[in-house]
Image (cartoon, helix red, strand yellow):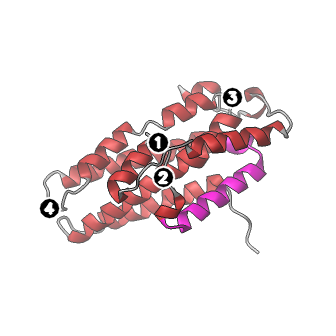
């Protein structure tokens, strides 16, 4: 039986899936209609990936990292990526602006993946209980397999929520955001666990509170 996945592995695998789509775009001749389809698929993957981060990653970051609130607030700001996707939306591969916007999209998505994988994920892995990471990883995997309507909307007003509504017409329902419910659940679990180690106990070289600044 294969090992259970965890949150970090699932999100890293999603980064690699987007990378593969970008490679396919680069291998397609300029002006080829397939470029538009591949770019649209990459945008859709980025939208659902952003929704997964807002639902599952950032609540855990806030809960288990001593500087987690600052990390989550900064990383949840996707204004530049959102702007590129907004400008790219609906453009045909033959549009003069298409290639430049596609390059900007690759740069923004790559920077996002590198910061998460090289700076955030190691700290979260050291601070967050393994069973919590496994549980959140299973939720990400289940959400990926489910139809978009079954997964439900991203938190109200979020970058992913706006993009999902633009791409798929998904509505945001009233009521407590999913993110709030998960943070409440993580808080209840944390109350039953030993206190998390302080930053000096689990932060390796380069992994200090100033990393979020």
Badge 4 density bin: few <14, some 14–19, many ≥20, Cα 10 Å: some
Q: Nearer the viewer, mark 3 or mark 2?
A: 2
Q: CA distance from mark 3 to mark 4?
A: 48 Å
- Residue at image position (48%, 38%) is 76
Counting residues from the N terminus, which is met first, the one under dot 3 or under dot 2? 3
Residue 135 in percent (x, y) is at 71, 55
Q: CA distance from mark 4 to mark 1?
A: 35 Å
Badge 1 density bin: few <14, some 14–19, many ≥20, Cα 10 Å: some
Which residue sits furthest front? 174
Disc 4: which residue: 94
Disc 3: which residue: 66
Residue 94 in percent (x, y) is at 14, 61
Disc 1: which residue: 156
- Report helix, strand or loop for mark 4: loop
- Residue at image position (22%, 49%) is 100
Q: Nearer the viewer, residue 11 or 173?
A: 173
Q: Are marks 4 and 1 in contact (CB under 8 Å)?
A: no
Check residue 136 for magenta coloring: yes
- Residue at image position (44%, 36%) is 77
Q: CA distance from mark 3 to mark 2?
A: 29 Å
Q: Nearer the viewer, residue 54 or 43?
A: 54
Q: For this view, does 181 lie left or right of residue 153?
A: right
- Report helix, strand or loop for mark 3: loop
Q: Nearer the viewer, residue 167 or 39?
A: 167
Disc 2: which residue: 153
- Residue at image position (51%, 41%) is 115
Residue stretch in magenta:
123-147
């Amino acid at each position: 039986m294969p090992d259970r996945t965890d949150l970090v592995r699932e999100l890293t695998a999603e980064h690699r899936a987007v990378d593969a789509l970008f490679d396919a775009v680069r291998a397609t001749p300029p002006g080829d209609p397939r470029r538009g389809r591949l770019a649209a698929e990459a945008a859709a993957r980025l939208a659902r990936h952003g929704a997964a981060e807002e639902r599952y990653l950032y609540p855990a970051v806030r809960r288990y990292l001593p500087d987690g609130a600052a990390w989550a607030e900064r990383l949840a700001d996707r204004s530049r990526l959102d702007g590129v996707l907004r400008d790219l939306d609906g453009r045909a591969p033959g549009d003069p602006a298409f290639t430049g916007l596609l390059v900007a999209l690759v740069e923004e998505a790559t920077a996002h993946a590198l910061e998460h994988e090289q700076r955030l994920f190691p700290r979260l892995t050291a601070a967050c209980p393994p069973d919590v990471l496994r549980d959140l990883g299973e939720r990400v995997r289940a959400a990926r397999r489910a139809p978009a309507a079954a997964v439900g909307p991203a938190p109200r007003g979020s970058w992913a929520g706006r993009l999902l509504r633009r791409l798929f017409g998904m509505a945001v329902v009233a009521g407590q955001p999913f993110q709030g419910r998960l943070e409440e659940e993580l808080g209840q679990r944390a109350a039953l666990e030993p206190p998390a180690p302080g930053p000096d106990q689990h932060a390796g070289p380069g992994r200090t509170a100033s990393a979020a600044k």
